[in-house]
Image (cartoon, rainbow, N blue to C red):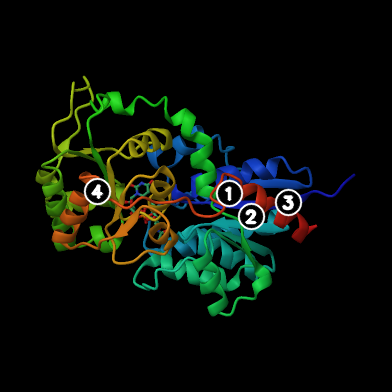
Amino acid sequence: MSTKYKIINVVGARPNFMKIAPIMEAMRKEPSFEPLLTHTGQHYDEEMSKLFFQQLEIPKPDIDLEVGSASHAQQTAEIMRRFEPVLLEHKPRLVVVVGDVNSTIACTLVATKLHIKVAHVEAGLRSFDRSMPEEINRLLTDAISDYLFITEGSAHQNLVREGIPEHKIHFVGNVMIDTLLKNSRQAATSPILQQLGLDNGQDYAVLTLHRPGNVDFKDTLERILTAIHEVARRLPVIFPVHPRTKKQIQQFGLEYMLSPAATNPPPAACPPGIYYVNPLGYLDFLRLTSKAKLVLTDSGGLQEETTVLGIPCITLRENTERPVTVSRGTNVIVGTDRERIIAESQKALSGRAKKGQIPEKWDGLAADRIVQVLKQGIA
Ligand code: UD1
């Protein structure tokens, strides 16, 4: 009988799901691999988790750790505590982690201490802002992983500067874009534009906000929403609200700045204003962003997706760990200054946004490249 290598893939939070989908698919086609999926349960709501499994056809997790929400220390520790027995039982040849969430570092740390090799997908990205929890997760994960799969050239420079040997670094492209390209036809059938009264060809913008630095402080959140209010005088701004942000908006009493989106019955047209909706599934969100005139966001993944879609992206942060989206793509880093948000939005709305190009190897084949590297490495 030929040898099968057991590989444990880890997901935890929403942005992990679109990254693991193509990796699981490519691994399942490789006869020498036996891929298993662990869901830590960092995200657990239907619309933050289950919907993505269904729409992206991710196999049901083999192992559910069900950790839920807690402080950083408690959540990270609980994932570690529950993941260790999984590795002791299955003794995998390799653990694959993606992105930069607490689940990423927690599982990497457990595997490494048990002398199990770790592959980190989306390695080497750096915002150089250590107040972001993700930056700490990225630095630590990369320092102790064995395979570092990178999406852009800056990641190579960052890793080499941090003393990572070249042979560990593999430029494979972007698995998140594998998922986008695979699902774009399906997304075109989503009814979301009709539901929101946006299917008449009118212009609209999309807003997402969830970074603690933006939503956990009343002054900052209020300043951002005030600026978006100015933008929303010209066109509707659709705002799918992340659970963290929803909690903060309620706590700070800022609900008065937003209107509920009318979906039932759908309006004939959507007048200017900021409209909140619940977090959307992958296909609805891809449809919504792909037809938007403008996206305003503090998300990392959305900076990449808008670059591939050719949609102007205004990033409401002072930095990005994904500089290729600025140097080649449609992204502009604007911060949270009111005047800059308004000025850059107006530029985009009057058709003066920069035109981008698609970064190298963001071509839908990243997961296949990862599997090829791993096949040679672990056999
Ligand atoms: C996490 C990641 C962040 C990622 C984001 C994407 C870390 C440190 N942060 O941030 O990098 O960009 O996910 O969404 O790993 N909640 C729910 N339902 C859920 C999940 C969370 O209501 O399914 C609420 C809880 O009240 C929780 C809060 O949202 O306390 C924040 O969730 P948490 O997973 O701690 O961090 P995110 O802000 O989602």
Mark 4 and 1 residues: CB-CB less than 8 Å, in contact?
Answer: no
Mark 4 or mark 3: name the one nearer the start of the chain: 3
Circle 3 residues within 10 Å: few <14, some 14–19, many ≥20: some
Task: State the image coordinates of residue 345 (x, y, percent, origin top left).
Answer: 21, 51
Q: Residue at x 59, y 65 (%)?
A: 110
Instruction: Quickly name the residue at label 1.
Output: 38
Distance from disc 4 to disc 2, alpha carbons, whole Å, reads 49 Å
Task: Classify residue 268 as left or right of residue 358.
Answer: left
Distance from disc 2 to disc 3, alpha carbons, whole Å, reads 12 Å
Which of discs 2 and 3 lies nearer the camera? The answer is: 3
Instruction: Quickly name the residue at label 4.
Output: 348
Is residue 92 in sight in this rendering? no
Q: Which mark is residue 6?
A: 3
In what element is the residue under mark 4?
helix
**Amino acid tagged 2:** Val
Q: Which mark is residue 86?
A: 2
User: In which quadrant of the rendered image does the N terminus lie?
Assistant: top right
Mark 4 or mark 2: name the one nearer the start of the chain: 2
Task: Classify residue 84 as left or right of residue 135.
Answer: right
Task: Classify residue 260 as left or right of residue 159.
Answer: left
Mark 2 or mark 3: name the one nearer the start of the chain: 3
Task: State the image coordinates of residue 3 (x, y, percent, origin top left).
Answer: 84, 50
Judge whether 368 appears above or below 275 on screen.
below
Which of discs 4 and 2 lies nearer the camera? The answer is: 4
Mark 1 and 2 residues: CB-CB less than 8 Å, in contact?
Answer: yes
